[in-house]
Image: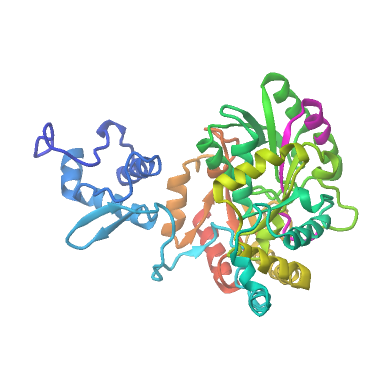
Amino acid sequence: MPVNSFKNYFLSWAPEPSELGRPCYLSIANLLEDDIRSGRLAPGTKLPPQRELADYLDINFSTVTRAYNLCRERRLIYGSTGKGTFVSPLPGVPGDESSSNLIELGVVNGFDNVSKQIIEATEAVLSKGYVEKLYSHTSALGHKHQRVAAMNWMRKFNVSADEEHTVLFSGSQNAISAALLSLFKLGDVIAVDVFTYANLIGTAKLAHIRLLPVAGDAGGMIPEALDECCRKNRVSGIFLMPNCANPTGITLGDERKRALAEVIRKYGLILIEDDTAPALPAPGYISLYSLLPEQTMYICGNLRSLCGGLRVTAAAFPEKFRNYLLNGLFLLNIRTSPLDAEIMTELMLSGKAEAVLNEKMVLAKRANKIFDRIFPESSAGERFAFFRTLDLPSEWSDPVGCEAMFEAAGVKVLHSARFSVQVRPPKNFLRLSVSSAGSEKALDAGLKAVRELLN
């Protein structure tokens, strides 16, 4: 029994003791994370002292200490000497601390250490005589010459749109957010792959849009399954990543694209095509946009592969989306940074963009060889991908606990549950970045740590 009575004693955070499971420290950490991420505990909230919380829960003091330490590692809370423990201002967002020895295999940074051409393009822009004009107000669409450059770049992906139907966004996530908030209504249903882009899931929740998972196979979403979902539900749109889909790495073949396009056309769905191809396509490439130009918002996610720090991507849209989409862009961020857009334009026009992608492809192939050497049993996947997947045993279904175990082993990973809208996804796997460790030596060590823990 607790030493003290808590009937009239305020605790800023008091989880229900009956909700605790085993191991107890992990259960406390998970409950605390849920309350922080849901907003029930606001940033800056001072948490109960560890001894008081231990007394309230009638558990050992060291158990609470262990739970708090785990939440610190997850960057959910922080301690201030002499003041106490507080909820972080940006829970889960990495800070500037340099003491962490964790090897990053979770977030896909896309070989951001390839920066020589990015720096050269930035210097070229700053040396131009019209740079001061970039600081003035522009159209929400972006400067015309920037849109023309983006238009020509998208043509490499079989997307034919003129400059009046090309727009610049502050990154792919910004484009996705604008699409969800402007092209859809509260309660609309969007069809997605069973495992899909995690940030889409989060944004859809904020917008109160329902995501409906559609069955797929090794070739991607199954057209017949999509047709059945549309017959049984009022589906308004569909989100597809045709190249190296995140997190599965699946690329749609031409036949599958045409079959899906028929179903999308049949039901008049709005298609958001997020093309995250890490490399330029071969001649004859077919985009979903080319099959459904009047129903598709095409997001050139390929541009995110050039430089994570340049928050610029291009999108093509049909005329009927214009007013909705541009209004959404304006209300979200008015316009994309003209300076960032000019650097991206310089990369595209100078040929440096292709050089960056080619250099990253070389690194990606070498990184994938390291992955295949350590995990020869893994599924095949694109050999130039920036990430790979690794199947987990069925009992490894708790994403928080699973990721915490790997953190304890020195590596950051992401569990497949982060990428699913289903409460019980059909399989468990890790999405492992091969492009974020910082060096091949670190990647090798990180993957070997994963291998050792799995064994």
Magenta-span inclusion, residue 264: yes
Q: Residue 124 location in percent, x, y?
A: 68, 78
Q: Residue 452 location in percent, x, y?
A: 51, 60
The image shows residue 57, relative to residue 76, as above or below, that is above
The one nearer the camera, 339 or 86, is: 339
Q: Residue 390 location in percent, x, y?
A: 61, 51
In the picture, measured across the screen, residue 408 lies left or right of residue 145, that is: left
Magenta-span inclusion, residue 135: no
Which residue is at the far left? 4
Residue beneath the point at 57% across and 32% down: 209
Q: Residue 151 location in percent, x, y?
A: 79, 56
Residue beneath the point at 84% across and 50% down: 160
In the picture, measured across the screen, residue 105 lies left or right of residue 72, that is: right
One can see residue 393 in this view:
no
Q: Quadrant of the N terminus?
A: top left
Which residue is at the far right? 284
One can see residue 293 in this view:
yes
Residue beneath the point at 41% across and 63% down: 95
In the picture, measured across the screen, residue 164 lies left or right of residue 37, that is: right
- Residue numbers of the magenta segment: 261-280
The one nearer the camera, 164 or 316, is: 164
Which residue is at the far top? 232
- Which color scheme is applied? rainbow
